[in-house]
Amino acid sequence: MTDHEGVRIERHEYVVELVLDRPEAMNAVSTRQAESLVAATRLLADDADVRAVVVTSSSAKAFCVGADLKERGSFTDADLMAQRPLARRAYGGVLDLPVPTVAAVHGYALGGGFEIALACDLIVADESAVFGLPEVSVGVIPGGGGTQLLARRVGWNRAADLIFTTRRVSATEGSQIGFVDRVVPAGDDRMAALELAAAIAQNSPVGLRNAKTAMRRGLDVDLASGLDIEDGCWRATAFSADRREGVEAFNQKRTPRWPGRP
């Protein structure tokens, strides 16, 4: 276990749990917690043994309620401007993790909390989850990737509905709209997300990383360019030690022992 202030890392073999750990504030993201999130995601990004990351919360009431507005209440404009690059690094650190990521959401996932979940590849939400982007109601806009990530998941019109109205939606509606991937009974979000990540982590580490790279890099280019990106990632995987082990294990009818090397 590795601890940073407001963030905790727990390892489950090849799956790492990144715990938002400021329960007294329902994980309202303070400057210190943002710094810890940057440090933790950098640590995980550099760890070749990590195959999947699950983002969870130690708060019983919330995944994360967004920016710490109590802290920001004392900010000058200069303070807010100075904090902005840190906020981008914090949310970007989750988004740029090179391995598959799963958000385990219960309770409130509002503002920046919703954006942390959107920065993950998959969202598992229990029946208590409540999502919303309330920023325009307090005079700002989503700034942790929400205007971009939500629209890419659900389309411009559905994202506009949620951002412009600031309305809150349940896990069930989130699934119907398209940003929640799995809805589970109340209290089961963490275990369901860890089980999903463990299933993902059984696969080739090289394949997982290159598949994510191909998907991420190809998302906003034309089809021909995307296919070129895919081809490059395919080549990086096909000539790896993982590919050789995968074929050998298949033919020998055994579980692969992934080298995890390009």
Image (cartoon, rainbow, N blue to C red):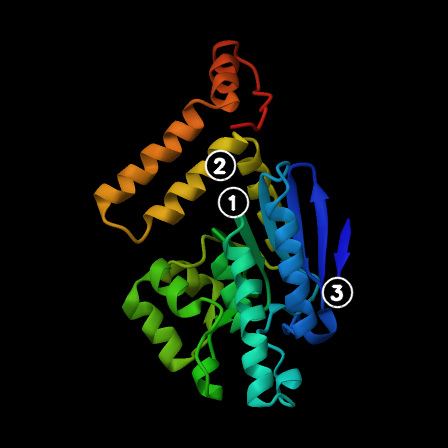
Specify the quadrant of the image occupied by residue 4.
bottom right
The answer to the question of whether label 3 and label 1 lie on touching residues, with beta carbons closer than 8 A, is: no
Question: What number is the disc on residue 100?
Answer: 1
Mark 2 lies on a secondary structure that is helix
Disc ID at residue 177: none
- Classify 185 as above or below 262: below
**Residue 246 pos. (x, y %):** 50, 20
User: Where residue 5 is drawn, which disc sits there?
Assistant: 3
Given the image, on which type of amino acid does mark 3 rest? Glu
Local crowd size for mark 2, using a 10 Å CA cut-off: few (<14), some (14–19), many (≥20): many
Looking at the rendered structure, the secondary structure element under dot 1 is: loop
Q: Nearer the viewer, residue 155 or 67?
A: 67
Residue appearing at x 47%, y 21% in the figure? 243
User: Amino acid type of disc 1?
Assistant: Pro
Instruction: Say the numbered circle drawn on residue 208.
Output: 2
The residue drawn where x is 66% and y is 49% is 43
* Mark 2 to mark 3 CA distance (whole Å): 30 Å
Q: Secondary structure at mark 3?
A: loop
Of badges 3 and 1, nearer the viewer stands: 3
Tell me the residue at 45%/37% (across/down).
210
Tell me whether the residue at label 1 lies in contact with that at label 2, contact meaning CB atoms closer than 8 angstroms: yes
Can the viewer see residue 246?
yes
